[in-house]
Amino acid sequence: MTTTLEQEVCRLQALLSDREDECRELKSEARASNDEYQSMLRIIEADDRLAQAHAEVKRFAELNRVLQVRLNGKMTEAAELMKTAKHWMNKVKRLEKKGEVSR
């Protein structure tokens, strides 16, 4: 009975996590769409549209550079966390084999 409840809780947590991911993705897409609209609006309303378009390209290039650095940092962090998780999972397995820990 406990196992069934635990399984259901895990299933619901996974479902909630999926929905949260979808919401974050939609929010990000909406923000990007709004940023693009604002960028186009600045170009259209500028006196020198070519100069403004060039400024927007430079702004987006810098934003892209910053996001790439952040992404690289997060990927490194995720890889380190995976190594740590595997280490502890292996340690638990070894202890379970010895009979020192039970699930």
Image (cartoon, rainbow, N blue to C red):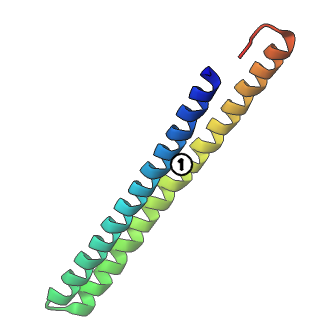
Determine whether, in the image, residue 32 is placed left or right of residue 4.
left
User: Residue 53, position in %: x, y?
Assistant: 29, 86
Give how far across and how far down residue 101 sits, in percent: 75, 11
- Residue at image point 82% right, 9% down: 99
Task: Identify the residue shown where x is 60% and y is 46%.
Answer: 76
Say which residue appears at 66% left-offset and 38% top-offset: 82
- Residue 65 screen position, x and y as percent: 46, 64
| Figure quadrant of the C terminus | top right
| Residue 39 screen position, x and y as percent | 26, 78
Q: Secondary structure at mark 1?
A: helix
Q: Is residue 97 left or right of residue 78?
A: right
Residue for badge 1: 73
Q: In the image, what residue type sits under mark 1?
A: Gly
Tell me the quarter of the picture where residue 33 sits: bottom left
Describe residue 89's horizontal placement relative to residue 42 as left or right.
right
Res 30 → quadrant: bottom left
* 80 and 59: which is toward the camera: 80
Task: Please state, as top left, top right, bottom left or bottom right, where the N terminus lies in the image.
Answer: top right
Looking at the image, the residue that sits furthest to the front is 1
Above or below residue 40? Residue 94 is: above
Residue situated in front as seen by the camera: 50 or 38 = 38
How many C-alpha atoms fall within 10 Å of the one at disc 1: few (<14), some, or many (≥20)?
A: few
Above or below, comparing residue 102 to residue 14 in the picture: above
